Image (spheres, coloured by chain):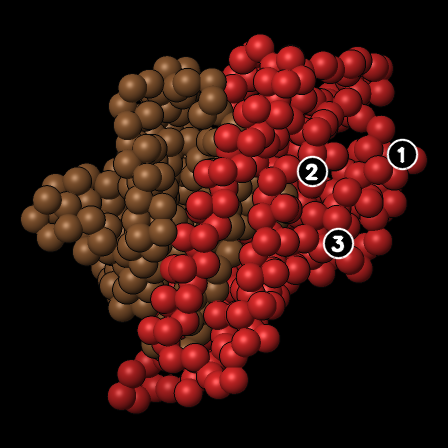
Amino acid sequence: MVNSVKLINKTVEHVIKYISEAVFSEKFARNKDGFLQKLDPRIKIIGLIILVITTVSIKHIKVLLFLYILSLVFCILSRIPLLYYIKRVWLFIPLFTGIIILPVIFLTPGHPIYIILKKPYYIAITYEGIKYAVLFTLRVATAISYTVLITLTTRWDEIMKALNSLGVPDIVITIMTLAYRYIFLLLNNVLEMMYSKKSRLCRNLKLKESWIIAGKSMGALFIKTQRMGEDIYYAMLSRGYLNEPRIFTNFKVKYYDIIFLCFIILISSISLGYDRLIL
Amino acid sequence: MHIPDGYLGPITCAFFYLIMLYFWYRGIKALKTLHPKQIPLLGILTAFAFLVMMYNLPVPDGTTAHMVGGTLIAILMDNPWVATIAISIVLFIQAIFFGDGGITTLGANCFNMGVVLPFVGYYIYKFLRNKVGDVVASGIGAYIGIVTAAIVAGFEFGLQPFIQPGYCPYPFTVSVPAMAFAHLTTAGPAAAVVTAIVVWYVKKTRPDLFELTKKSMEVS
């Protein structure tokens, strides 16, 4: 049977990947000597988001290449192992994007580089097609590079505080903080459920069986979360929760941060200007 | 169905952020009417929504598919707005921390999976539950919900070449059938069966919970 114990194996693999990624990110974010780690989280998040938006708006490979190299420079300055960073960015989404975009190489009309077939259909790899595919993939990869930089250099609580001081309502922050905290507990729960199920299996699962097992396990998880929700509320009450979360922040914008933000705005306006007006 | 950064152009992204501002505003307003007791529950439910996406469901073509869980949460909590908020937060966490989806496309992703999917699924469930029963209705709701969301995502991809060329290159004659086919045949049936089983399981083991959530939500 094709489907065997895929439900269990793949889910376990996925869960472990998420946990280890989160743990790794925290490790780099706690490194105080890095360039991006030193910045005020609000300024850093705004700056990197500006760069993501700029990246998405760029239409020329040259400019994108410049932005991509800039992200690598940020990575080195922040003391993140370059190879780890590149692997984390490129594995999966840009790779997957590269495959999705592949047909465009043959479909875009333009100067042929290599003619595969003349009859009965004319199929050729065109210069324009390759340009399109490279541009698209590089854009996706560069945007992801900057997003990953946010994660790798900012702790979760800092991101939450920064979002709060940028105007995201308290109630949303409370839910997010709770959610993120309990994701890891529940991930462990799922792992345990998967292991215990696997240890009791003595044959492969059929497709339908694996769906039923997944459904039951989600149902059990839901019942658990219901009870936990109540417990957490009482735990919060007993510690003096007054229905209004207080989020303490001690962020201070320094000269260093202002210079960084000016630099980012300069870079993104030069890139955009060069992209639209000169090229 | 998570659209990464770079697939949609700036205009499309801004458009969906604008649409989502309205839904987020309505969602937060709905949150403020909840009993304080339900806020931690909502936090945990968001974590649950995240976990639901972690299950790799085997599908007939030999690969695995994911379920979004929007319909499931809307049904279990009897309130689609809860699903909108929970799924939006999950998508944000995934985009920022785990690189699934993107920052610029967050609006579009939240619209597809956090608005279209739970609302379509939930109202189909509501419409059918007295005719075919809770379990079957939830399965049908989940199926139609995920397929509709996929088709909407397909349209977003497909309109992109006409709005701003240079991004996702495939017109909707290609993208809509591609998205719809994958979800009609693989992810859709998996989501339908699993959602129905969760509803059946929760109803069977904790019928009080199923009724309780409904009542407490109505009171609040």
Q: Do the residues at pointers 3 and 1 share their chain? A: yes
Marks 3/1 in contact by CB < 8 Å: the verdict is no
For the residue carrying disc 3, how many other residues have a C-alpha within 10 Å: few (<14), some (14-19), or many (20+)?
Answer: some
Q: Which chain is red?
A: A
> What label does residue A32 carry, if any?
1
Q: Which chain is brown?
A: B
Q: Do the residues at pointers 2 and 1 share their chain? A: yes
| Label 2 vs 3, first from the N-terminus | 3
At horizontal 56% and vertical 31% (from top left) the residue drawn is A231
> Which marked residue is nearer to the observer: mark 3 or mark 1?
1
**Mark 3 belongs to which subunit?**
A
- Residue B64's spot in the image, x, y percent? 44, 69
- Residue that badge 3 annotates: A85
> What label does residue A150 carry, if any?
2
For the residue carrying disc 2, how many other residues have a C-alpha within 10 Å: few (<14), some (14-19), or many (20+)?
Answer: many
Residue B137 in the figure: left or right of residue A100: left
Question: At label 3, which amino acid type do we have?
Answer: Tyr
User: How far apart in space, not on screen, are marks 3 and 1 (Cα)?
Assistant: 18 Å
Question: At label 1, which amino acid type do we have?
Answer: Lys
- Residue B185's spot in the image, x, y percent? 27, 68
Residue B30 in the figure: left or right of residue B86: left
At horizontal 59% and vertical 18% (from top left) the residue drawn is A237
User: How far apart in space, not on screen, are marks 2 and 1 (Cα)?
Assistant: 15 Å
Decide: is B165 above or below B85: below
Q: Nearer the viewer, residue A37 or B145?
A: B145
At horizontal 65% and vertical 59% (from top left) the residue drawn is A17
Element at badge 2? helix
Marks 2/3 in contact by CB < 8 Å: the verdict is no
